[in-house]
Every structure is written in structure tokens, then in C-alpha cells.
């Protein structure tokens, strides 16, 4: 019985450690939802989702940057990366409104995607 109890305690402790940044930081999950719904169609040449939702992406990036972060994710590197994500997302929205080319949209969206994955990687290091 003691072994079973010990095993249960270990499993519960590991479950808490296994939480991802998406579980611990709701704004990250919300940004990812919009990014995935706009980036993956763009990979296939469909830029309509990002053209119609660029403002929403910029707003979610702002919330990710300026909203409350879990303490473990308040590192200098993560703060800088979320600021950059907000700047890039705002710039993409502004340029889409100005009518930039599809190639430019794709380049900027790829950069936003890369920055987001940098943040995810930084968060994984901070578990």
C-alpha cells in the first residue's frame, strides 16, 4: 500500500511539471490559436486568413506581451521576445492595411512564426 501511495505522489508531482507554457500562460495559447489559423493556410498559399485577421493577431500579440506572465516566464529573454512579437505583429497589420505584396506578407508572417517558436523554446527552458 505504501508503494502504491508513493507511486501516486510521484505521478501527481510529475503531472505538475509536465504542464506546458500553453497550459500555464493562457495568452500564449490564444496567440497560438490565431497564428495557427492564419499561418498554416499561408503555407499553402492562402493569405486570406491573415489578411482578414491581422488586427486580431496584433491584439493577441499585445496581450501576450503586456498581460500577466507566469513568474517563471518573466525572464529578460522572454520579455524581449514578446516585445518583438508585438512589434512584428503590429507592423504586419499596418502593412496589410497599406496593401503590401503577398510575398511581403509571407515574409513577415514567417518571421512572426519564428519569433513565436523562439518564445515557446525559451519557456520550455524555464520550466
Image (cartoon, grey):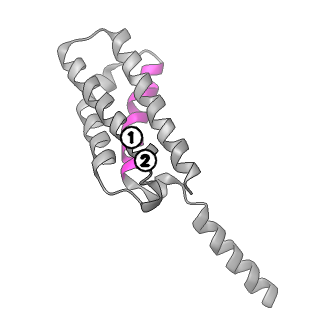
Query: Quadrant location of residue 42?
Result: top left
The picture places residue 115, in percent across and down from the top left corner, at 45, 32
Question: Which secondary structure dominates the residues rendered in magenta?
Answer: helix
Residue 41 within the segment the image draws in magenta: yes
- Whether the residues at callouts 2 and 1 have beta carbons within 8 Å, the answer is yes
Marker disc for residue 80: 1
Q: Is residue 55 above or below residue 77?
A: above
Does residue 1 appear in the picture of this structure?
no
The picture places residue 64, in percent across and down from the top left corner, at 33, 47
Please tell me whether mark 2 sits on a helix, a strand or a loop.
helix
Closer to the camera, 58 or 49? Answer: 58
| Quadrant in which the N terminus is drawn | bottom right
User: Which span is picked out in magenta?
Assistant: 27-43
Q: Is residue 22 above or below residue 50?
A: below
Q: How many marks?
A: 2
What residue is shown at x 43% (from left), y 15% (from top)? 45
Q: Residues within 10 Å of mark 2 (few under 14, many from 20)?
A: few
> Which residue is labeled 2 in the image?
76
**Residue farthest toward the bottom in the current orientation of the protein:** 1
Left or right side of 103 for 66 = left
| Quadrant in which the C terminus is drawn | bottom right
Q: Is residue 43 above or below residue 73?
A: above
The picture places residue 100, in percent across and down from the top left corner, at 26, 11
The picture places residue 65, in percent across and down from the top left corner, at 32, 45
Q: Residues within 10 Å of mark 1 (few under 14, many from 20)?
A: few
Query: Quadrant location of residue 47?
Result: top left
Closer to the camera, 69 or 42? Answer: 69
What residue is shown at x 32% (from left), y 57% (from top)? 68
Marker disc for residue 119: none
Amino acid at each position: 500500500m505504501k508503494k502504491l501511495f508513493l507511486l501516486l505522489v510521484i505521478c501527481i508531482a510529475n503531472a505538475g511539471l509536465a504542464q506546458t507554457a500553453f497550459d500555464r500562460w493562457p495568452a500564449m495559447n490564444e496567440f497560438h490559436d490565431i497564428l495557427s489559423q492564419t499561418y498554416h493556410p499561408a503555407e499553402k498559399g492562402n493569405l486570406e486568413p491573415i489578411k482578414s485577421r491581422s488586427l486580431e493577431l496584433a491584439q493577441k500579440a499585445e496581450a501576450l506581451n503586456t498581460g500577466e506572465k507566469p513568474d517563471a516566464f518573466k525572464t529578460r529573454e522572454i520579455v524581449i521576445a514578446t516585445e518583438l512579437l508585438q512589434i512584428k505583429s503590429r507592423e504586419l497589420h499596418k502593412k496589410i492595411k497599406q496593401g503590401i505584396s503577398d510575398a511581403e506578407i509571407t515574409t513577415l508572417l514567417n518571421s512572426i512564426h519564428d519569433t513565436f517558436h523562439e518564445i515557446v523554446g525559451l519557456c520550455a527552458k524555464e520550466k
